[in-house]
């Protein structure tokens, strides 16, 4: 069974940093692209970033709202993806989901973790 | 304001068919594929439709997707109480150079 488990969330002050992890199992991690998507309280979904697999050159893209503050990375040997979040703002408060794409082009966000909560507050 | 627009709410009686729209533009829906996600309250989203009109295995054929020009639609036939959820469309936008989600449509089964 494909599983994604996010961790690393918590309460953090504005301006500080946090690193989220997405630990996976049940599939060949190196063959799939991954994204982070967040959901603010009572709000909709917001795509943040993706990293493709090596076959697609480990291409990385960011949403404008997090570019230059957030960094996505992956460790294929461990089956883990990371989201380094710097200079956190109150508006970054959200539930952060790790997602995995499907094995065909076009199947984005096929599998989701349960999310990890990030609260940015002084 | 989202780049793609969904109605905030929809409703229907059990057994009926409802349609949820997702309106975009020439930089997203018109030229890129659309995916749909179902999010039941308190749960993570689930992929419902990919590549405009393809159902992942395990998704009932009561759910169908379509696209015409810069608009896409999700249809749910034979409405059931367990279909109550929020539904989101998502598409790559060439101007934004990223994925954009609609704001979601809350479906109520009367």
Image (spheres, coloured by chain):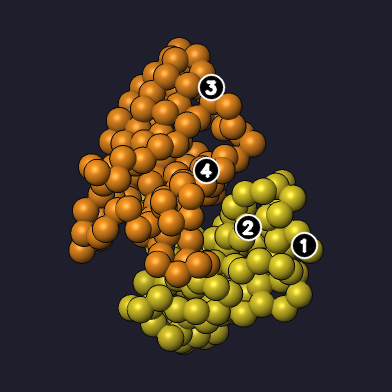
| Badge nearest the viewer, 2 or 1 | 2
Q: What separation in Å lies between label 3 and label 1 (alpha carbons)?
A: 31 Å
Q: Are marks 2 and 3 on the same chain?
A: no
* Coordinates of residue B15 in the picture (x, y in percent): 46, 87
| Badge nearest the viewer, 4 or 1 | 4
Q: Which residue is mark 1?
A: B25
> How many other residues sit within 10 Å of disc 4, few (<14), some (14-19) or many (≥20)?
some
| Residue at 48 percent of width and 61 percent of height | A108
| Badge nearest the viewer, 3 or 4 | 4
Q: Colour of chain A?
A: orange
Q: Quadrant of the N terminus of chain A?
A: bottom left
From what the image shows, is residue B37 above or below residue B44? below
Q: Which residue is mark 3?
A: A89
> Circle 3 — which element?
loop
Residue A7 visible in this rendered orientation of the protein: yes
The quadrant holding residue B47 is: bottom left
Q: Colour of chain B?
A: yellow
Is residue A6 found left or right of A69 in the rendered image? left
How many badges with numbers are in the image?
4
> Circle 2 — which element?
strand
| Badge nearest the viewer, 2 or 4 | 4
Chain to which the residue tagged by mark 3 belongs = A
Q: Name the residue nearer the viewer: A31 or B75.
A: A31
| Badge nearest the viewer, 2 or 3 | 2
Q: What separation in Å lies between label 3 and label 4 (alpha carbons)?
A: 22 Å
| Residue at 36 percent of width and 27 percent of height | A19
Q: Which residue is mark 4?
A: A60
> Circle 1 — which element?
loop
* Coordinates of residue A86 in the picture (x, y in percent): 48, 21
Chain to which the residue tagged by mark 2 belongs = B
């Amino acid at each position: 069974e494909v599983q994604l488990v996010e961790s690393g969330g918590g309460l953090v002050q504005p301006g500080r940093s946090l690193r989220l992890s997405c630990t996976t199992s049940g599939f060949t991690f190196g063959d799939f692209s991954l994204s982070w998507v967040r959901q603010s309280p009572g709000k909709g979904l917001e795509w943040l970033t993706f990293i493709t697999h090596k076959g697609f050159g480990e291409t990385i893209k960011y949403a404008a709202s997090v570019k230059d503050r957030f960094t996505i990375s992956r460790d294929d040997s461990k089956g883990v993806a990371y989201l380094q979040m710097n200079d956190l703002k109150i508006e970054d408060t959200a539930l952060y989901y790790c997602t995995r794409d499907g094995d065909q082009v076009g199947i984005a966000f096929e599998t989701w973790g349960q999310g990890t909560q990030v609260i940015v507050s002084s | 304001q989202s780049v793609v627009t969904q109605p905030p709410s929809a409703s229907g009686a059990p057994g009926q068919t409802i349609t949820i729209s997702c309106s975009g533009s020439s930089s997203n829906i018109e030229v890129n594929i659309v995916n749909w996600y179902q999010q039941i309250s308190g749960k993570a989203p689930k992929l419902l439709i990919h590549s405009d009109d393809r159902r992942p295995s395990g998704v009932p054929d009561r759910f169908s997707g379509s696209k015409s020009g810069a608009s896409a639609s999700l249809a749910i036939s034979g409405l059931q109480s367990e279909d109550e959820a929020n539904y989101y469309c998502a598409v790559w936008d060439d101007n934004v150079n990223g994925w954009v989600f609609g704001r979601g449509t809350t479906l109520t089964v009367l």
